[in-house]
Amino acid sequence: MTHTAIIIGGGLHGLSTALHLARLSGWRVTVLERRHVGRHSSGINAGGVRRLGRDMAEVGLSMVAAEIWASLPALVGDDGGFRPSGQMKLAESDADMAALERRHDAMRAAGWTHEELIDATEARRLLPAMAPHIRGAMVVRDDGAANPMRTVMAFRRAVLAAGAEIIEGVSVHGIAPGLLVETDHGPMRADRVANCAGAWATGLAAGLGEHIPTTAKASMMMVTERLPPFCQPTVGSQSRALSFKQTEEGTVVIGGGHQGSNDLATETANVDFANLAHAARIAADIFPVVRNARIVRSWTGIEARTPDQIPVLGESRVLPGLFHSFGYSGHGFQLSPAAGAAMAELMARGATNLPIGAFSPARFAA
Amino acid sequence: MFQRTEPADCSIEWDGAVLPARTGEPLAAALLAAGVVRLRGTVLSGAPRGAFCMMGACFDCVVQVEGAVVQACMVAVTPGMKAAP
Amino acid sequence: MRVDVLVLGAGPAGMSAALEARAQGLSVLLLDENAAPGGQVYRGARADARGPGADQARAGAKLAAALAGSGAERRFGATLWAIEPGPVAFFSEEGGARRVAAGQIILAPGTTERALPLPGWTLPGVMGVGAAQILMKSAGLLPSGAVWLAGQGPLLWLYAAQALAKGGRIAGIVDMSGPRTAALWHLPAALAAPGYLARGMAWMGAVRRQVPVHRSRDLRAEGDGQLERVVIDGTPHPADTLLLHDGVVPNTQVTRAIQGCAHRFRAGAWEPVVDEWGHTSTAGILVAGDGGGVFGAAAAALSGRIAALAVAHALGCFGVEQRDALAGPLLLRRGRQRAPRRFLDALFPPLPPPADPVMLCRCEEVSAGRVREAVALGCLGTNQLKAFTRAGMGACQGRVCGPLLHSAVAAARGVDGAMVEPLRTRFPTKPLTLGELAALA
């Protein structure tokens, strides 16, 4: 017997859910995407494949995802540009170093050992170009970074190869009782529906009377021209908002959660340069070598942020058969291969052993 | 090739060689008038490139002037200017 | 910093807009990336100009002189790199970034040459015809030695006529234009602008009497490290310079970066959607001159004045009746100037995309063949093409390759260009250093 599923949203979480579900026998899966796959934050995020610094509630799923990333070609036939080049969070002061030590203790106490505290000498060995004021760092050596759009395209191809259908250019207006998905091309029905609509997912839930509070965010990023290689790992700071990554091409992608403006209705987001200037300042403070590098593009993508900054992943409280996966709050890229697997198990079997308990939509029940 | 209709009034250095130039003209024009056609190799393949659009659009004429990376077509010659690939 | 009107670009449209806005009593900041006013058409314009194109040069010199005494604040060597809602603009000059809030912004960015990709076109020694004209205007350089021109369009013939009249030498011209029949439909409208076409025909005739003209689309540039020969229909000819031209396209680098600013595909190129005043679909942002659709310098100057009157009205200088009374004659004159354009557009539709081995994106070195492969894999547009190939992501930010990638994707998909969205641009639309940006924090 064949079951049907509609996945709303052609971002990475929607594609990953579709892929895992389509590979189970007996599922006919359709992805509905309003624009084109990877249009918003999925295709244009910083590409961090990071366990480092995760919320304790996310560490378990993040560890599962890391395993999948390490063998991504087995899942989607391409590595998505993933390189285990390391993730580092720098201490810029003694207070930063103390905070990293507390984090380190807390992680050990919880039984996690992947985050490693290193001193300034080792940090400088890993990052010869860093400024002299760095005191030390936390590092996950086999974390890394991938190419977001290449990853999206790999998932897209894999979804199609698994026999699922991706329909681009179709907008979903609402979900009605009976799992009726209302689109601008008419209603569609399925046995299971996944709400992977990113920043627009809260609105779809609200249409059913289900309150899941998210706000839209538009984290800004910029990229420089190609520079000679000087930095392998992805670098952040303990006390200042920074994400800093030199790509294989030599360009440097700089972000860190500095917010631009956004408008959900028109699906637009604008860079706020006075705000983005802070990211430039932090980057130039930590890597003086980039001070004269030229910025060639900046951008922002729209994403949903929950009040507790961990995602919503689980079955709807009000409409059985509808499953939510959104609200990744700016750090869902790494989680996507594992989150999609969890969603597929929930949708097909009603349960999963993957560690997603903290993400239940029920936590927002009044 | 290109020939001058107005005389040079100063000199510049290109990669150590002294070339005649005219104050205020685009650096790329001074180089072309002196027969310097190839300005750089691309980062990707090393393919040779020279001035192409002369209006700041194509970035093929990117050179170093006094340590700064500039478009040779958008920089005005000053006497004694030192430029290099 | 705060001004009533920010004008970008000191060509015919920008200078005229700044002058008109000053005449209506508005404070004006005029930015141009170049060291002197003029833009491309009026570059180095002198009041005593003679020969082909001299009427334009005299008009430009007059405009620049009036502007200097107008009280408009003029900043040359100033590069605008972002516009935010407000409107607020950011620009850099002398290595420092600046922020300016404006009542309204008039963009007069002009055009860029549509590149003409053919085998060997990335070799040093191969340039644009427009580039050679800039060398003539800004440095007095004339073609000499084995200089070839190839492609199509009025500027090619104007440049050849100008260069020959000043004593330059051209070895040959390769005319790549197509059959002329389609253009004849638009001839009656074109004839409404007397002088315009007649002058063009006269240039072409003068050039043909002095320079051999080959009619072919089979052209290659060859050489070891730089151009050494052109090969026309399989026959090599010595060459040290090859100047290519396939018309000009509106410079939409800034308007395409403004989220929600609508554009339309016309005459083989994207242009911002503007009303008769120059208003774009984004509040407070106007476009004047060829950046809003190519109609030539005289029409551009009129568009600049018309846009300034619309801004003066919006900022409360006068009511609708006075605006319409002041603008009425300008709108009529502009209509006559625009008349020949459809004829020229039909005469010179863009040349078809080149064969697979030819480079389309010079910065990221992406060939036409790789673009076609991406389309075969399901790539629908130029923005997805970036993910497939990195085409359009280099230092030029798509300025040169944008139209080429667009037409190659459309042709490979077998759809009209209007069906393929234009390459999205991103601020900063001109590179600025991290240090410059950091200084704004």
Image: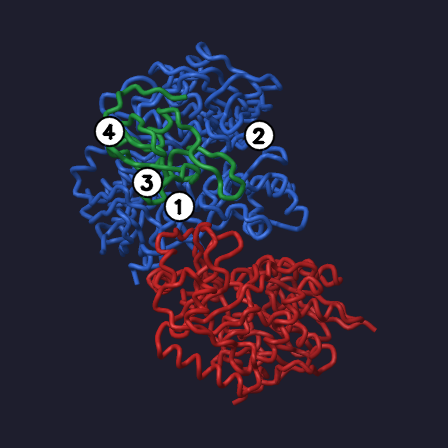
Chain colours: A red, B green, C blue
Q: Is residue A280 above or below residue A358?
A: above
> Which numbered disc, 1 or 2, marks the residue that appears first in the sequence?
2
Asked whether disc 1 touches disc 2, contact meaning CB atoms under 8 Å apart, the reply is no
Q: Residue C119: which disc?
A: 2
C-alpha span from label 2 to label 4: 40 Å
Which residue is painted at 25% across and 49% down in the image? C312
Q: Position of residue A327 (x, y in %)?
A: 53, 75
Which residue is painted at 31% across and 23% down in the image? C140
C-alpha span from label 4 to label 3: 31 Å
Q: Position of residue A227 (x, y in %)?
A: 45, 51
Q: Closer to the camera: disc 1 or disc 2?
A: 2
According to the image, label 3 marks what residue? B65
C-alpha span from label 1 to label 2: 40 Å
According to the image, label 4 marks what residue? C61
Q: Amino acid at mark 3?
A: Val
Asked whether disc 4 touches disc 1, contact meaning CB atoms under 8 Å apart, the reply is no
Q: Amino acid at mark 4?
A: Ala
Furthest toward the front, the residue is A121
> Which numbered disc, 2 or 4, marks the residue that appears first in the sequence?
4
